[in-house]
Image: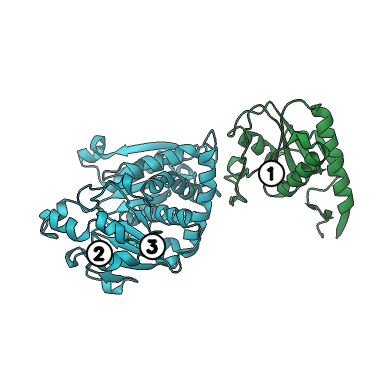
Chain colours: A green, B cyan
Amino acid sequence: MSTMVMSADDVRRAVTRIAHEILERQRGGSRLALVGLQRGGAWLADMLGDTLNAIEPAAHVPVGYIDVSMHRDDISLRPVIPGAISRIDFAVDGTTLVLVDDVLYTGRTVRAALEGVNTYGRPRAVQLAVLVDRGHRELPIRPDYVGKNIPTQVSDDVRATAEGVVITKATS
Amino acid sequence: MKHLRSIPELGADGLTRLLELTNHMVEVNRRPVPKVPALRGRTVVSLFFEDSTRTRLSFETAAKRLSADTMTFSVSTSSVNKGESLRDTVETITDMGVDAFVVRHKSAGIPWQISDWTTAAVVNAGDGWHQHPTQALVDCFTVREARGCERFDGLTLTIVGDIKHSRVARSNIAAFSMLGAQIVLVAPPTLLPPDVAHWPVTVSHSLDDVVGRTDILYMLRLQSERMSQGHVPNLREYSERFGLDARRLAMLPSDAVVMHPGPMNRGVEMLIDPSALPNSLIHRQVANGVSVRMAVLFDLLAGESSAGNLREVAP
């Protein structure tokens, strides 16, 4: 059974709000940069980047993408198929770098991304923006910007796209 | 994939998979810190019974960039000198808990033998005249990168030199034909294998005849010991007929590329300074060596744990 918990409009409004929160927290200070987590976070990073640059054209926020499969801690537990290739074309050193992912769950992907980002340089600060926080964290990781908190069961499947967020309950 | 021993064994799907995976490793190698923790806790041992510079060093660099531990087995300082057999050597190293053997040996088939004696993955880094699969992966990746294409349909690969004794030629013929290339071999009859009629290639004895119709000119090294064995009358005659000189370079189509697996014999098969070649991929071949071997080690050792070697041995 599938339920749409966020519509396309909800997603767009959440992204706009997060963009304002990021800029407010920044106070126009250090250089902002976004890094989307491949693959689910890539579209969201693009959308958030476009929104930020529309609100504050002078900010010139660059958007990069990171594939964290080679930094995962469960690499020996299951087959690993790297997704899209990482691409970070800007200097990471000294930026306020916002990691962007669609769904925050155990926190393990974010942990891998924190480690991965360090192979590109040393950001001044790293923050985390997610569209959906579905709970069930296994690591001490907390998002800075959340589109929506949605309580879920571990067995639920959560799909997030620009067209909306859909939860599918496991049929038992 | 449990082992990488030959290109035919790898197959076309495996070849494509490893070439795709190499793109990821190229990106890792471009980072300011080109190291990822993917193979942390895994051990790779290089077991080289023959000399090597680029293959051994690029495997070791590849293992280190993936955070694997490396061991180097050096034959000249090992118990092989006390008469320890290959099998005992392999079993001893296996007992120490290794995940992969990278093997080079002068006899064909040794990687298959070794995989019977160990639970670890075996990578063939050259066995006699037989196979050198990672070199073929490097060469395919380098051509893909240079031409910006995924398959080689419509391209002609011309391999020049000592085909008979060349594992690089055998692996490359298999790999490039899997990707759709036409293959032309150029060599004196004494340096062609007796069964060449069964290979998916056309044969020429004159470089001048074919150089104008090639997209990839692949020069092999002429090993000087071949002369003493009577395969070529003398090096000068060989160079004149099969060497790459300025005249033949001018006959190459303008978008053709030149490759060589190294080490090069300047003045024998390479009569011009390779750094003066306008379209040489020789440095790209070396540079891509590390990324390709990272892809191979990652493909073999990531995923389900093979580190249970110690546990699998009965107490």
Where residue A70 appears, as percent x and y from the top left, is 58, 43
Q: How many marks?
A: 3
Whether residue A106 can be seen here: no
Q: Mark 1: give few (<14), some (14-19) or many (20+) Cα within 10 Å.
A: many
**Circles 2 and 1: CB distance less than 8 Å?**
no
Q: Nearer the viewer, residue B174 or A88?
A: A88
**Circles 3 and 2: CB distance less than 8 Å?**
no
Q: Nearer the viewer, residue B42 or A54?
A: A54
Give amino acid for label 3: Asp
Q: Is residue B71 above or below residue B144?
A: above
**Circles 1 and 3: CB distance less than 8 Å?**
no
| Residue where numbered disc 3 is placed | B215
| Residue where numbered disc 2 is placed | B207
Q: Mark 2: give few (<14), some (14-19) or many (20+) Cα within 10 Å.
A: many
Label 2 marks a residue whose chain is: B
Label 3 marks a residue whose chain is: B
Q: Report the disc number at residue A37.
A: 1
Where residue B165 appears, as percent x and y from the top left, is 23, 58
